[in-house]
Structures are given as C-alpha cells and as structure tokens.
Image (spheres, helix red, strand yellow):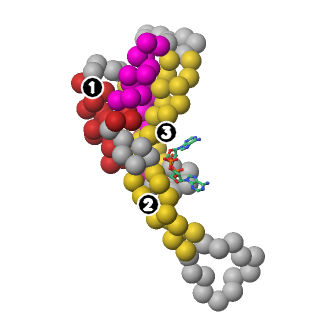
Amino acid sequence: MKLIIAVVQDKDRRKVTDALLEEGYKFTNIASTGGFLREGNVTFLIGVQESQVDNAIELVGRHSKTREQFVNVFPPTIEPIGTCVPSPVKVLVGGATVFVVNVDRFEKL
Ligand code: 2BA
C-alpha cells in the first residue's frame, strides 16, 4: 500500500475532492499552510494500492491549476534605513506538490 500526500491550492480543493470521490478513492484532506507564502492550502492524504498510484496522481494533477502570485520581498537590511519599500516578486504556485510514501502497516480498528 502507498500513501499519496498531495499539497493543492485551496481554490482547487473542490474539484480534486469531487474527482477523487467520483473514482472511488478514500482520502482525508487537511487544511494546511504553505511555508513560503504563508497562505492556506490543502493537503490530501490518499491511501491506495500500488496499481492505483499513477491514476490518482494524474487525477490530482488534472484538477490542480498553476497560478501566478506576487509576493512582497523585503530587502535584507541590518539597520533600518528610511522607508523600506518591498519589491513584489512573481512566483508560480501549483498545480500540485505530490509525495508518495510506502505504508508499512494499515489498520482500521
Ligand atoms: P508555499 O511554501 O507557500 O510556496 C508557494 C510557492 O512559492 C511555491 O509553489 C513556489 O513556487 C514558491 N516558493 C516556495 N519556496 C520558495 C523559495 N524559497 N524561494 C522562491 N520561491 C519559493 P509550489 O512549488 O507549487 O508549492 C506549493 C505549496 O506546496 C507550498 O506552498 C508548500 O505548502 C508545498 N510544498 C512545496 N514544496 C514542498 C516540499 N518540498 N515539502 C513540503 N511542502 C512543499
């Protein structure tokens, strides 16, 4: 058995959820926060048989869009000099960030 951990943008939560349910996958989603943007995203935990891994990843990817986002970066200064003007930097977020890990043991008690 494998566990797919997929981080998806919050805006895609509904579409990914619907697609996984439609194909009969069992999963949990957890509200999470990206370390860089510090914004809400969602992490799906999907327990699957090895033969289902590729299909599940394809499904998540198909419903996760890539979006451009601007983030304000403050120049690193040791001493504050006058007014500090942040410069917006464009980052590409998504589609999905996916990890696949082995499950040593799975129990439903
Ligand atoms: P965030 O950490 O908020 O990152 C959002 C986006 O910012 C990233 O999109 C990437 O384009 C950019 N980014 C992240 N760290 C950066 C840095 N140090 N310098 C410049 N740009 C940076 P994605 O790569 O699509 O990642 C989306 C979300 O997936 C991340 O949100 C994070 O929650 C998760 N993620 C990505 N890589 C991960 C990893 N190696 N381990 C755990 N979670 C990860």
Secondary structure beneath disc 3? strand
Q: Indicate whether 20 appears above or below 7.
A: above
The type of residue carrying mark 2 is Gln
Which residue is located at x 31 percent, y 27 percent? 20
Which residue is located at x 50 percent, y 58 percent? 91
Q: Which residue is mark 2?
A: 69
Tell me: is circle 3 under 8 Å from ligand 1.
yes
Of all residues shown, which one is farthest toward the right? 78
The quarter holding residue 14 reads top left
Which residue is located at x 47 percent, y 13 percent? 50
The type of residue carrying mark 1 is Leu
**Are discs 3 and 2 less than 8 Å apart at CB?**
no
Q: Nearer the viewer, mark 3 or mark 1?
A: 3
Q: Which mark is residue 21?
A: 1
Q: Which residue is mark 3?
A: 97
**Are discs 1 and 2 less than 8 Å apart at CB?**
no
- Residue numbers of the magenta segment: 40-59
The type of residue carrying mark 3 is Thr
- Label 1 to label 2: alpha-carbon separation: 29 Å
Tell me: is circle 2 under 8 Å from ligand 1.
yes
Q: Indicate whether 71 appears above or below 51.
A: below
Upstream in sequence: badge 1 or badge 2 = 1
